[in-house]
Image: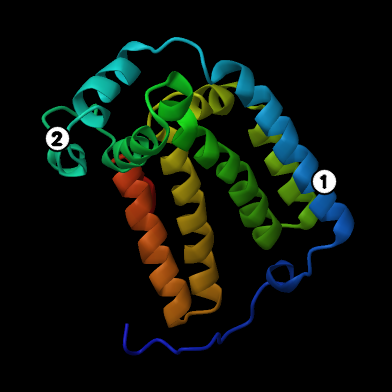
């Protein structure tokens, strides 16, 4: 870490430095609104088994410490359970509240895949990737399921993008952001370690 430069060196890809135009921004907003529209109808449906187990064993507990320290079954996606516990403490007991972190991270994933594809390929491919993820049925379903899958996907995409950026422009900022996003991905779901590692 001490040997890394503090400023960017190397040759960044042309897409990394491409300014965001108004048209591209408006298309990204439209894709985000489409993603919200597809996800909202399912956010208040009844709980499934894993969601019930998460709510009872890891969210509706007396303290945040109980959420963080309880891992007697692989069902606890600790990072997600912490976010759900905070939402539960702030907004009360409801299906929408328990699923709110999944939905927000699912929407964040749409923007993250745009950022990743834009930096690595082109603006058009970034928008296409965002569109495909916005309408992908599995992603829509997991965005309204109180589990850590959308968080794992979001932070894995961000960590991958930062890793590739770190290869092109090694510096302390990129390495710290990569480490933090990788840790958050693993905290959301342990299987993210397979992608990060």
Circle 1 sits in a helix, a strand or a loop, which is it?
Answer: helix
- 91 over 8 or under it: above or below: above
| Furthest residue in direction left, as rendered | 72
C-alpha separation, residue under disc 1 versus residue under disc 2: 42 Å
Residue count near mark 2 (Cα–Cα under 10 Å), binned few <14, some 14–19, many ≥20: some
Query: Looking at the figure, which quarter contains the N terminus?
Result: bottom left
Determine the residue positioned at 44% across, 9% down: 46
- Residue 71, which numbered label? 2
Coordinates of residue 127 in the picture (x, y in percent): 76, 46
- 125 over 78 or under it: above or below: below
| Furthest residue in direction right, as rendered | 23
Residue tagged 1: 27
Give the colouring mode of the picture: rainbow
Determine the residue positioned at 51% across, 41% down: 105
Circle 2 sits in a helix, a strand or a loop, which is it?
Answer: loop
| Left or right of residue 113, residue 87 in this image | left
């Amino acid at each position: 870490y001490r040997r890394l430069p503090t400023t960017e060196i190397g040759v960044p890809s042309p897409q990394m430095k491409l300014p965001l135009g108004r048209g591209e921004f408006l298309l990204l907003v439209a894709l985000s609104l489409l993603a919200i529209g597809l996800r909202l109808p399912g956010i208040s449906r009844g709980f499934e088994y894993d969601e019930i187990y998460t709510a009872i064993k890891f969210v509706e507990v007396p303290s945040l410490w109980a959420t963080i320290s309880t891992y007697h079954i692989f069902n606890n996606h600790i990072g997600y359970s912490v976010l759900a516990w905070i939402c539960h403490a702030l907004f009360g007991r409801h299906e929408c509240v328990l699923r709110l972190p999944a939905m927000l991270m699912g929407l964040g994933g749409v923007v993250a895949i745009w950022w990743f594809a834009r930096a690595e390929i082109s603006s058009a491919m970034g928008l296409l990737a965002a569109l495909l993820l916005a309408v992908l049925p599995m992603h829509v379903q997991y965005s309204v399921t109180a589990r850590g899958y959308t968080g794992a996907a979001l932070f894995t995409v961000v960590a991958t993008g930062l890793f590739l950026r770190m290869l092109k422009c090694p510096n302390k900022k990129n390495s710290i952001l990569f480490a933090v996003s990788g840790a958050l991905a693993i905290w959301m779901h342990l299987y993210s370690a397979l992608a990060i590692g």
